[in-house]
Image (cartoon, rainbow, N blue to C red):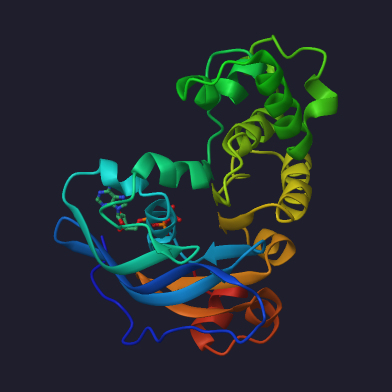
Amino acid sequence: MTTAAPSESPAQTISSPDEQYIQVKDFSFWYGSSQVIFDQTFDMPKQKVTAFIGPSGCGKSTLLRCFNRMNDLIDGIHHTGDVQVGGESIFDPMLEVISLRKRVGMVFQKYNPFPKSIYENIVYSLRVAGRSKKSELDEVVERSLRSSALWDEVKDRLQDSALGLSGGQMQRLCIARAIANQPEILLMDEPCSALDPVATGKIEELIHSLKRQFTIVIVTHNMQQAARVSDRTAFFYLGKLIEYDETQKIFMNPEKSQTEDYVSGRFG
Ligand SMILES: Nc1ncnc2c1ncn2[C@@H]1O[C@H](COP(=O)(O)OP(=O)(O)OP(=O)(O)O)[C@@H](O)[C@H]1O
């Protein structure tokens, strides 16, 4: 639980022509009486990859889960400030959370395919939404699997159980499932932490190609991964945004000594 926090968390703006797509504004968040996010303000650009880094417990996953209001399921939470996606507040009382989650897909640390066929994993949310036209579902399956670089490996066994895939394939299937509804944003919470280096490399390549279509935010503990896959990096400590900048700047020439200590492995 967070007991202390650094003294300042200034608004972090980066001058660039990119369209700022996710905007975090004076945002604070509490679990019950425990404040875990402190007055954060920063913007994430469209069709770029933003990495969240920082020591365990600094609030990376909590902030990520705010973006599709996953934390709503937890009793006793509250927030102040705002988060906007494409200019709209995600906390607008008129907004339906289901429609937000269609716009903001998520992939978790531990791949979690349903105990169903590869095909049914991908079309699951479409079936729940009442879409059952075979030609449409077939098209979504092929498009999603191609986008997640899995089509060639599974196209001849779409009716086989997803649980028979390798770990890396299961994670790519979860990415295919997350993008089946063509969200605008893809949130990835340590997507490679359960994978070996080869499977991790494939997901990293995939992230590079996916950003042509999606705005991606990734939480990672792996500094090399953040440096490899992201355009922007946000470094958090004890619930505060310490530094946010182009990834190259954060890793090569950070402004703050705390950032430098963390990215160089001197603490954390
Ligand atoms: N459901 C919850 N109820 C109460 N406190 C929580 C809950 N989830 C997280 N926390 C607390 O919120 C703080 C931030 O946790 P969070 O998981 O967001 O950090 P993190 O930076 O993602 O950590 P890690 O890198 O270890 O995953 C921690 O103090 C954690 O104990």
Q: Position of residue 47 (x, y in %)?
A: 67, 61
The residue that appears at 14% across and 61% down in the rendered structure is 33
Q: Position of residue 189 (x, y in %)?
A: 52, 49
When the figure is inspected, residue 205 is found, relative to residue 98, above or below; the finding is: below
> Does residue 265 appear anywhere in the picture?
no
Comparing 147 with 226, the one in front is 147
Q: How many marks?
A: 0
> Does residue 78 appear anywhere in the picture?
yes
Q: Position of residue 49 (x, y in %)?
A: 65, 62
Q: Position of residue 239 (x, y in %)?
A: 35, 69
Residue 157, image quadrant: top right
Name the quadrant of the N terminus.
bottom left
Q: Quadrant of ligand 1?
A: bottom left
Report whether 233 appears left or right of 74.
Answer: right
Residue 163, image quadrant: top right
Comparing 138 with 252, the one in front is 138
The residue that appears at 19% across and 61% down in the rendered structure is 34
When the figure is inspected, residue 156 is found, relative to residue 239, above or below; the finding is: above
Residue lying at the far right of the rendered structure = 152
Report whether 112 appears left or right of 17.
Answer: left
Residue lying at the far bottom of the rendered structure = 255
When the figure is inspected, residue 142 is found, relative to residue 72, above or below; the finding is: above
